Image (cartoon, grey):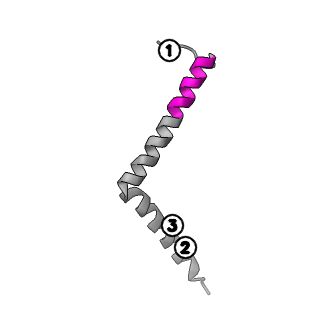
Amino acid sequence: MRLPSSNSVKRIDFDVLEMLVFKTPVYSQQVLNVGNEIQALIFGMTCLGSFPDFS
């Protein structure tokens, strides 16, 4: 006998994914935040000399 719950869990996951992808203001804001964090991390590492100077 199959458990019916596995389908509903997948459905919930899909709904969450759909919400993240299609609610663009929230999603793009999260992407921007991550991008800013990565830029700050790279900038910090460059200042510390951990990165070679590519320019």
- Image coordinates of residue 4 in percent, x first then y, are 56, 83
The span picked out in magenta is 38-48
In-front residue for pair 27/2 = 27
Task: Estimate the spatial distance between the alpha carbons at disc 3 and disc 2, rounded to whole Å.
Answer: 6 Å
Is residue 40 on the magenta stretch?
yes
Task: Return the disc, 1 or 3, that comes first in the chain's sequence.
Answer: 3
Query: Disc 1 marks which amino acid?
Result: Phe
In-front residue for pair 34/3 = 34
Mark on residue 9?
A: 2
Label 3 crowding class (10 Å Cα cut-off): few <14, some 14-19, many 20+?
few
Query: Disc 3 marks which amino acid?
Result: Asp
Instruction: Identify whether 7 is placed above or below 48.
Output: below
Task: Return the disc, 2 or 1, that comes first in the chain's sequence.
Answer: 2
Q: Quadrant of residue 2?
A: bottom right
Query: Disc 2 marks which amino acid?
Result: Val
Determine the residue located farthest toward the bottom in the rendered image: 1
Name the magenta segment's main secondary structure: helix
Which residue is pictured at 60% across the width and 83% down the height?
A: 3
Which residue is pictured at 50% across the width and 30% down the height?
A: 39
Mark on residue 54?
A: 1
Q: Is residue 1 left or right of residue 28?
A: right
Q: Do the residues bearing badges 1 and 3 touch, measured as CB atoms within 8 Å?
A: no
Q: Do the residues bearing badges 3 and 2 touch, measured as CB atoms within 8 Å?
A: yes
Q: Which residue is mark 3?
A: 13
| Quarter of the image that includes the N terminus | bottom right
- Image coordinates of residue 36 in percent, x first then y, are 48, 35
Task: Estimate the spatial distance between the alpha carbons at disc 1 and disc 3, rounded to whole Å.
Answer: 42 Å
**In terms of secondary structure, where does tag 3 sit?**
helix
In-front residue for pair 14/44 = 44
- Image coordinates of residue 48 in percent, x first then y, are 63, 18
Label 1 crowding class (10 Å Cα cut-off): few <14, some 14-19, many 20+?
few
